[in-house]
Amino acid sequence: MRYFIPPPADSLIPMDANELLKKIRKIEIKTKGLSQNIFAGEYHSAFKGRGMTFSEVREYQYGDDIRDIDWNVTARSRNPHIKVYEEEREMTVMLLVDVSGSRNFGAMGEQKRLMIAEIAATLAFSAIQNNDKIGMIFFSDHVEKFIPPKKGRRHILFLIRELLDFTPEHTGTDISLALRYMTDALKKRCTTFLISDFIDSGDYYRALSIANNKHDVTAIQVYDRRDAQLPDVGLMRVQDLETGALRWVNTSSGRVRKAFNKWWYERQQVMTDRFNRCGVDYASIATDEDYVKSLMGLFKKRGVR
């Protein structure tokens, strides 16, 4: 059961070059400002580098761990020396972005596709403020595109353009496939943001658990209020944006609306249960909400751990 009110026809028309450049610039100004002025400290403390890198060698002091002794330097100097390590701040960040058909739905606010683009761009600019590399995987029920991690503003603008203009070849959703691909493709531990509406009939628990053991996965759900609740507007023609199926629904029927609400509630319960069992932090954001507040809450929750 996954039916949506068809989006306005003009929302699915590809943007021309000038319109695309304007949207890229608008998103850059907004999200770069957020990353510099609001998120900088929270992102830095919430997503610390998890590795340790060699810093220097110094003479052994009482209380130092003998496992850190550098025996080569000790032999040459005839005095015990130890290796000093510091936390590796630089990370690789991967954005796993759902580009399935349901992202084009938007009845209560801006389309999920546009909010996903803004959230992803905000995370990307936050990453480069932290001197992190950032890459992206677009997925539907196939892996649509893999963009290797890089640094720099030019790379971020390329990612934003792809977020706005990329046209997937498929419309379904397979979160498990995307997680498995990411786990296999990236050998070094990375910070991963999984951005989706999580409307997926498959079971992605095992793939999420394996991915979060190898990497550091954070989930961000972007949904529309009408994903969760049908309006009472009588007989309405609806379309499944992932399969293209059309059907008539009597939204004035209390039984129909109750069944739809029950489907959404149970689906959300399954989703949050999977996140909790896997130890994955998450935020759930409606398209008519201010995503800044939700991301701040997510960052602060991680920062106190």
Image (spheres, grey):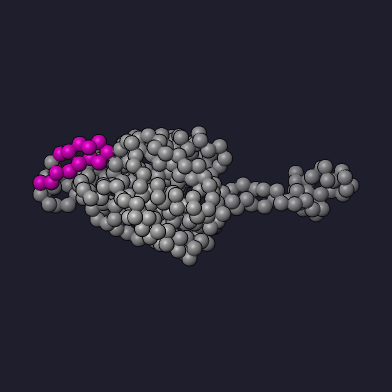
Q: Is residue 95 above or below residue 184?
A: below
> Is residue 155 part of the magenta span, yes or no?
no
Q: Nearer the viewer, residue 190 or 125?
A: 125
Looking at the picture, how far across and down is residue 131, in whole percent?
A: 56, 54
Q: Going 45% across and 53% down the picture, which residue do you hit? A: 157
The one nearer the camera, 282 or 88, is 88
Horizontally, residue 40 falls left or right of residue 270, namely right
Q: Residue at x 35, y 35 (%)?
A: 141
In the rendering, at what x and y percent does residue 69 appear?
Answer: 78, 45
- The stretch of residues the image draws in magenta is 235-247
Q: How many marks?
A: 0
Residue shown at 36% from the left, 58% from the top? 22
Is residue 97 visible in the rendered image? The answer is yes
Residue 207: image location, x then y, percent = 44, 35
Q: Is residue 298 visible?
A: no
79 above or below 22? Answer: above
Q: Residue at x 21, y 48 (%)?
A: 9
Residue at the right extreme, as displayed: 78
From the viewer's perspective, is residue 124 above or below residue 275?
A: below
Picture quadrant where residue 44 is located: bottom right
Whether residue 238 is in magenta: the answer is yes
On-image quarter of the N terminus = top left
Q: Is residue 66 left or right of residue 234?
A: right
Question: Where residue 77 sits in the image (x, y, percent)?
Answer: 88, 48
Residue extending furthest toward the bottom: 37
